[in-house]
């Protein structure tokens, strides 16, 4: 396994089982995540025997940057993994900091009708290190610090639950990269049992839910997950989330021309979310070459926004990053493969 798979607590545990002081974990985390060394031999304050132990038990390989597309406030990466699989990450520069959108799986099984990622079925989960290394690779390449992480790249985070939770532990650790829980956002299509677990495990991490439709008929059409977990149980568990965590929930709502952007939909959406501690993020749809949906016109988006506002819904419109850079979920990978 990779050393970047290890949460701080697991590394402490590892040293204890090897008969070493658990304090070694502090040193190793410091070398990995503060000093960012590339090999165990660079960990000069760690004694030889311990280094050979680490070398025997762990790999330390970085990700390979296969392709990079740079725009004004956005930089999109295609990485190659050790087994030849490819994953994407997108760095966005906001006025409040640098946010990285990381992938959590290779492909995705959720099959949302509008989404490029789902055109490729899930091949496997990403390992913890493959998520952690997306952050390290981008920070090194751009010589920046990433302040925010959103799990909104390829994959459904709650279909790779355990690795995603460990990943959050790794990047949240004060001994390591130290990204605050409130600066981490997990986005899910609505896997209800996992949301229940997340209420217990997620601490202060933000939750975003891809809603995209205000009723079951339309949501069934757009998102197959809705057949397993329709709006009623979804909304119930989200109300529980708000009650237990006291945190404000985000609903993502992509705007598809003529599909979910009507005034009736806006009114239904206002009713659905009434009384919830949430806000709705309207996302201009990023058109892709292989899917027939079109993005709503700016006028329709504004009209939808106004209707929600009038009905006392907190709502924002997401700034469009990198649509010219194929920043929509899964686009870079599928275009790369199409080119080959
Ligand atoms: N599986 C998770 C996270 C990955 S997708 C989820 O469903 O939330 C991140 C967000 O991008 C989701 O809201 C998804 O619906 C949205 N999305 C997918 N394709 C898109 C596109 N072409 N344009 C805009 N948003 C898209």
Image: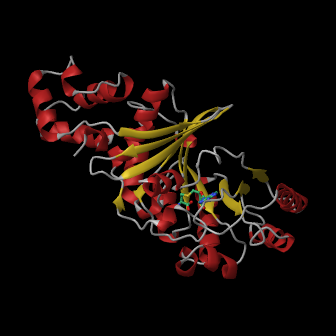
Q: Is residue 279 rendered to the left or right of residue 97?
A: right
Q: Position of residue 50 (x, y in %)?
A: 13, 28
Q: Quadrant of residue 73?
A: top right
Q: Nearer the viewer, residue 340 or 14?
A: 340
In the current view of this chain or complex, which residue is farthest to the front? Answer: 340
In the current view of this chain or complex, which residue is farthest to the top? Answer: 44
Q: Residue at x 41, y 59 (%)?
A: 161
Q: Position of residue 20 (x, y in %)?
A: 14, 32
Q: Quadrant of residue 183?
A: top right
Q: Residue at x 58, y 48 (%)?
A: 327
Q: Quadrant of the C terminus?
A: bottom left
Q: Residue at x 38, y 30 (%)?
A: 175
Residue 217 visible here: yes
In the current view of this chain or complex, which residue is farthest to the right? Answer: 310
Q: Is residue 156 rendered to the left or right of residue 295?
A: left
Q: Nearer the viewer, residue 187 or 176?
A: 187
Ligand 1 position by quadrant: bottom right
Q: Quadrant of residue 17?
A: top left
Q: Residue at x 23, y 20 (%)?
A: 42
Q: Is residue 271 rendered to the left or right of residue 252?
A: right
Residue 43 visible here: no
Is 155 located above or below residue 178 in the figure?
A: below
């Amino acid at each position: 396994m990779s050393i970047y798979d290890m949460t701080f607590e697991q590394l402490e545990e590892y040293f204890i089982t090897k008969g070493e002081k658990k304090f070694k974990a502090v040193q190793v985390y410091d070398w990995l995540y503060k000093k960012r060394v590339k090999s165990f031999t660079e960990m000069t304050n760690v004694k030889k025997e311990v280094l050979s132990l680490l070398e025997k038990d762990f790999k330390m390989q970085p990700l390979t940057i296969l392709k990079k597309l740079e725009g004004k406030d956005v930089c999109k990466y295609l990485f190659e993994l050790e087994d030849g699989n490819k994953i994407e990450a997108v760095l966005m520069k906001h006025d409040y900091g640098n946010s990285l959108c990381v992938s959590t799986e290779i492909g995705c099984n959720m099959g949302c009708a509008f989404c490029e990622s789902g055109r490729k079925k899930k091949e496997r989960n990403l390992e913890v290190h493959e998520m952690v290394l997306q952050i390290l690779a981008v920070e090194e390449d751009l010589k920046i610090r990433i302040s925010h992480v959103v799990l909104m790249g390829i994959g459904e985070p709650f279909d790779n639950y355990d690795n995603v939770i460990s990943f959050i532990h790794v990047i949240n650790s004060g001994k390591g990269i130290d990204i605050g829980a409130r600066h981490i956002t997990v986005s899910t299509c609505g896997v209800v049992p996992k949301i229940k677990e997340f209420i217990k495990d997620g601490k202060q991490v933000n939750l975003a839910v891809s809603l995209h439709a205000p009723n079951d008929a339309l949501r069934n059409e757009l998102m197959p997950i809705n057949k397993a977990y329709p709006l009623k149980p979804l909304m119930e568990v989200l109300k529980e989330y708000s009650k237990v965590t006291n945190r404000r929930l985000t609903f993502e709502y992509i705007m598809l021309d003529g599909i979910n952007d009507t005034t009736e939909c806006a009114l239904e959406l206002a009713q659905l979310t009434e009384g919830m501690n949430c806000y709705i993020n309207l996302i201009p749809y990023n058109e892709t070459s292989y899917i027939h949906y079109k993005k709503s016109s700016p006028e329709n988006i504004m009209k939808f926004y106004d209707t929600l506002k009038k009905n006392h819904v907190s709502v924002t419109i997401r700034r469009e990053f990198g649509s010219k850079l194929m920043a929509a979920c899964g686009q870079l990978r599928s275009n790369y493969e199409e080119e080959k």
